[in-house]
Amino acid sequence: MRRVVVVVFERFQLLDLAGPADVFASAGLFAGDGGYRIEPAAPRAGAVTAHNGLAVHAQAALGEVAGPIDTLLVVGGFGVPDQLADRALVADIARLAGEARRVASVCNGAFLLAEAGLLDGRRATTHWWAAPEFAERYPATEADPAPIYIRDGDVWTSAGVTAGIDLALALVAEDHGHDLAARVARALVVYLHRPGGQDQFSLPVRVPAPRSAPLRDLQAFIDAHPAADLRIPALAERTAMSERHFARVFTRETGMTPGAYVERSRADAARRLLETTAHPLDRVARESGLGTPETLYRVFRRHWRISPGDYRRRFQAKEN
């Protein structure tokens, strides 16, 4: 039996525990003797209440847990910010990581791994919502908010909430092979390899508001008129700047070149049209300013690693 110690705490995300636990339990059922033993552990043994109000029983206090451990899994949730200041908890995670064959986190549980120094010099992901704060707070980690999960050596991190299922399936595939992991995925009615990355779920791009009122007005114009002439000469003329000066100031104040901002704004416009209309792709491309279905496809693949058609099938709002 492979021992999986799962770190939980008050106001954790229940699905971060339940999803991987069901993957491991199903894998054990199919693998026979090669199963997993799940051991929830918390700062104190006993009942631990998740954010949704349901409680799980932590079998042991973290300070009492000792190795060897096959997998140390740290969940995320709304309670993570409160736990970052708990030095005993962070120290226990660091200690147990040294006694585990591999370490993993779900969602913003990556903050706790980083706080314990386990992600220094590594590439890692977390929930897209928390990614900007994560990158700012832990500059020693190469933060990548796009993938569903990342493996860097013996440390694994995953995106938010249901991505813990993807992560656990990958761990099962490492332990027992692709065929058994695929069997588990079919039993749980999920993808073994989810199409695209988590950025297809994220909100439209938000960049810092420029200090200059003309540039703030220009951003609003770009977002409201994606099919307009948004080439640099036209944009510079709207701000009464030379093209060179405009491009330099816009990039300095927003962190993006004008061309990059326009493309992402148009991609977001296309995404909204795909979600809310039944327009054919050529009309979506025209109205979003991307011009042709070929450009629409290329931009979607570049930004969200998914085709426009697949995106519409997954996210279009349909009448009941």
Image (cartoon, grey):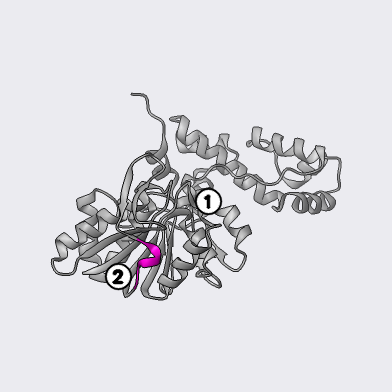
Which residue, given by chain and number where applicable, does mark 1 sit on?
82
Q: Which residues are magenta?
A: 61-66
Task: Name the amino acid, label 2.
Answer: Glu
Per the image, label 2 sits on a secondary structure element best described as helix
Percent position (x, y) of residue 243? 82, 49
First in residue order: circle 1 vs circle 2: 1
* Neighbourhood count class around disc 2 (C-alpha, 10 Å): few under 14, some 14–19, many 20 upward: few
Q: Which tag is nearer the camera, tag 1 or tag 2?
A: 1
Q: Depth check: 203 or 161 in front?
A: 161
Residue ID at (63%, 58%): 136
Q: Quadrant of the C terminus?
A: top left
Vertical relation: 225 (above or below) 61: above
- Report which quarter residue 176 is drawn in: bottom left
Q: Quadrant of the N terminus?
A: bottom left
What numbered label is drawn on residue 65?
none
Which residue, given by chain and number where applicable, does mark 2 sit on?
174
Spatial CA distance of label 1 from label 2 is: 33 Å
Badge 1 vs badge 2, beta-carbon distance below 8 Å? no
Q: Depth check: 207 or 273 in front?
A: 207
Q: Residue furthest top?
A: 320
